[in-house]
Amino acid sequence: MANRNTTGAERGTNEQQGFGALAQAVVRNKLEMSNFTPDDHPLSYDILLPSGIKVDVKCRGGSLPFQEEYESDDGIAREAKHNFFARQIHDENLDTDVYLLTHLETPKEDKLPGTKRQRKWILYICGWVSKERVYREGVYLPRGSLSERGRNWMQYRGQEIEFYNRNLNGLNDINDLLSIEPSNVEKDKTHKGALNLTSVDAVRIAYDLVGRGVLSKEHLAFVQKEVGLEKIVKPILHANQYFHLLKYLKEKGAITDNEIVKAHQILQEEPYSGI
């Protein structure tokens, strides 16, 4: 399952590329197509549909099943997203028409090719989207950008484009892929999707822009209504850091206890409780 980097585009690790090759092989098998060999594999796509549409299969692997939403410790779900390497989207020589997004659930020992005793290799088919729409609507994030998933934060090591699962075109069956026609792709190119942000991040950004004098509280209320989120969204930094600043401001005489009481209504200090 060697997947050689001949495009010059940024790619994942060899193991991640192996997951992608496995996903491609599974999809081709389910569509009753023969597999490419490393020598005749096109650079820009993995599947050529009967309609002439070129499909690039993208796969993310992990030990958990695919979830459309991830729970966080604040009780607010975070919507699932997919990631693309930005250079692959912006490279005109990689002339795929659509991306098929998949998720591979792996066992804890996820080294390929796996063993016959392992049963936890499950491929989830999430949906498809045109390359043009990812280019137009996806959110580019440079190296070092932060991204949240549920209870976890991660820092991107590559140049990424985020595109959210809710904005994909769904499939009822893998064979529905064979029915995609050029007209479907053309329609998707101009389709207007929802935000490619979590609802929580949309509200966080609105909070920040209100504080910077760009938006008003009315704009914040509009965003909260649009994403259906009325709960208080926790900040990126820990609440203890907020209270440290507030206590400093009180010591300097800049604020009173009133502001600290207000903060306690929306933020929770967390004292050390031992290991």
Image (tube, helix red, strand yellow):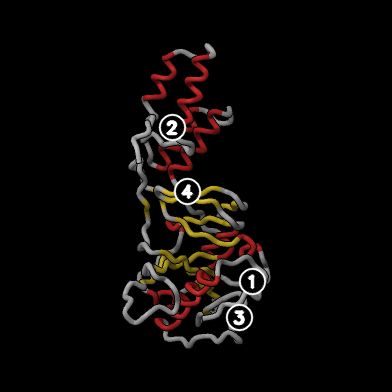
Is 124 positioned to the left or the right of 42 in the image?
A: left
Quick one: SS at disc 3?
loop
Quick one: SS at disc 1?
loop
Q: Nearer the viewer, mark 3 or mark 2?
A: 2
Q: Are marks 3 and 1 in contact (CB under 8 Å)?
A: no
Of labels 3 and 1, earlier in sequence is 3
Of labels 3 and 2, earlier in sequence is 3
Report, in whole angstroms, how far the alpha carbon at label 3 lies from the one at label 2: 51 Å
Report, in whole angstroms, how far the alpha carbon at label 3 lies from the one at label 1: 10 Å
Of labels 2 and 4, earlier in sequence is 4
Q: Against 61, is 77 above or below?
A: above
In what quadrant of the picture does the C terminus appear?
top left
Q: Nearer the viewer, mark 2 or mark 1?
A: 2
How crowded pointer 2 is (Cα within 10 Å; few <14, some 14-19, many 20+) is rated as some
Q: Are marks 1 and 4 in contact (CB under 8 Å)?
A: no
In this figure, which residue is indicated by the disc labeled 2? 239
Q: In the image, what residue type sits under mark 4?
A: Trp
Mark number for residue 94? Answer: 1
The percent position of residue 91, horizontal first and vertical second, equals: 67, 66
Q: Against 134, is 172 above or below?
A: below
Residue drawn 37% across the image and 46% down it: 72
Report, in whole angstroms, how far the alpha carbon at label 2 lies from the one at label 1: 45 Å
In the rendered image, the residue lying farthest to the front is 275
What is the total number of numbered labels drawn onto the structure image? 4
Mark number for residue 42? Answer: 3
In this figure, which residue is indicated by the disc labeled 4? 153
The percent position of residue 238, horizontal first and vertical second, equals: 45, 35
